[in-house]
Structures are given as structure tokens and as C-alpha cells.
Image: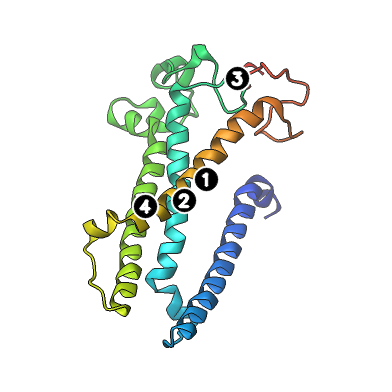
Amino acid sequence: MRRFWRWNSLAIVFFVLFAAALAADAFAGWKAFNNDAVVHHQETIGFLRYLSTSAFGRNVLENWQSEYLQFTLYILLTVWLIQKGSNESKEPEDVGIESDEQQKVGRHARPDSPWPARASGLPRALYSNSLVIVMAVIWIGSWFGQSVTGRSAYNADQLAHGQAALGWWQYVGTAEFWEETLQNWQSEFLAVGTMVVFSIYLRQRGSPESKPVGAPHTETASEG
């Protein structure tokens, strides 16, 4: 167990933080939901019932989809785009998908390489792009989930005010849906952009997300 913790501590801590934050978010959302119900003279609901509401699903999924969009774009763009001096960038000569020798695939694979890297054709192609494929699938799935739960919550509010409900396509075209979506997207793009630039000039000793403290500003991560 001690070795398991040591080798997996980063993932474990983040998943524990995720679970704690999600639980706290659910509790706070439940309280806010019931407070709003009281203000509008509607029936309050229990915590477990709140977890099945479209309001809770929308709030969670609209954040998930923006996070996975961020990672999907970041993974793809860093294949082809560079930022000189950034710890988040490759060197100009490494732009692109790189050679089989650099990627250690096919006849350049090591004996302990994953079997798809030693294979050819579709298995290697899928494995070579598996990270962005999975990230994109999660992003699209959570974005769709946000649109479905958001539509349900939107229509509940519409009906409560005596207005007509909207179909899925109609809801996806509303300003409310895109306001909620773009609020998250802009913050993710800003966070990644500042990380790329900050890693040129700022340091955190001991972190793999930072260049060595003594590295020049002009040194890109792959040079070190």
C-alpha cells in the first residue's frame, strides 16, 4: 500500500479533491435550489432528489465540457504550434507528429513498448492518437449532456412562467445556452494562455511544470 500510494499519489490526491469538491458543490447547489424554491413559493426537495435534477447535471457538465475542450485543443495545438522559451512548448525542429524513430514505434519500438506501438496499421494509428480521441469524446459527451440537462432546466423555468418549452435545437441556439458555455470557454483559454507565457519567466522549484530555476528565459522545455 505504501508503494501504491507513492507511485500514484498525484492522481489519488486529485481524485479525492474532485470527490470532495463535487460533494460540496452538490450540497451548496441543493441549498441554493431550495432557497430559490422558497422564494418562488415552490416545494423544496431532498438532497438525493436534487442529485437527479437537470439543474445539478447542467451545473456539473458545463464545467466538465470546458475543461476537456481545453485539454483537447491543448494536446492538438502543441503538436504544431510553439512558444519560444515556454515549458509548455516543443522546439521548432520538433513541430509535427515527429518520426517513427522519435516516437519509438514500429521497428524503432522497444521490447517493453505497448503492443500497439509495435504493431502497424489501425492499432498503431488509434493508439498514437488515443489521448486526444478520449479527451474529445469526453468533451463532446459532456457538452451534449450539458445541452440536454440545460434544456430540461430551461423548459422547467419556461413552463413555470407560462411560456412555451423549446426543442433541443431551439435551446442550443439560445443566447442563454451560449452565455453559459462561453463563460467557461473563455476562462479555460485564458488559463492555458497565461500558463504558456508565465512558464517562460516564472519558476516553481521541483515542479515538472516548470523549467529549472536557473534555466534562461529563452530556453524552451525540450532544450533542457
User: Which amino acid, by three-letter code, is at mark 1?
Assistant: Ser
- The residue carrying mark 3 is 222
Single out the residue that lies furthest toward the top: 93
User: Which amino acid, by three-letter code, is at mark 4?
Assistant: Trp
> N-terminal of the two: label 1 or label 4?
4
- The residue carrying mark 2 is 183
Relative image position of residue 52 (x, y in whole percent): 40, 74
Relative image position of residue 106 (x, y in whole percent): 38, 20
Residue under the point 27% across and 59% down? 171
> N-terminal of the two: label 3 or label 4?
4
Mark 4 and mark 2: span between their CA atoms? Answer: 8 Å
Task: Give above or below for 59 relative to 105.
Answer: below
- Left/right of residue 178 with respect to residue 74 in the rendered view: left
| Mark closer to the observer (2, 3) | 2
Of residue 158 and residue 185, the one placed in the foreground of this image is 158
The disc at residue 187 is: 1
Circle 2 residues within 10 Å: few <14, some 14–19, many ≥20: few
Mark 3 and mark 4: span between their CA atoms? Answer: 38 Å
Determine the image quadrant of residue 168: bottom left
Dot 1: element = helix
User: Which amino acid, by three-letter code, is at mark 3?
Assistant: Ser
Mark 2 and mark 3: span between their CA atoms? Answer: 33 Å
User: Which amino acid, by three-letter code, is at mark 2?
Assistant: Gln
Relative image position of residue 37 (x, y in whole percent): 45, 82
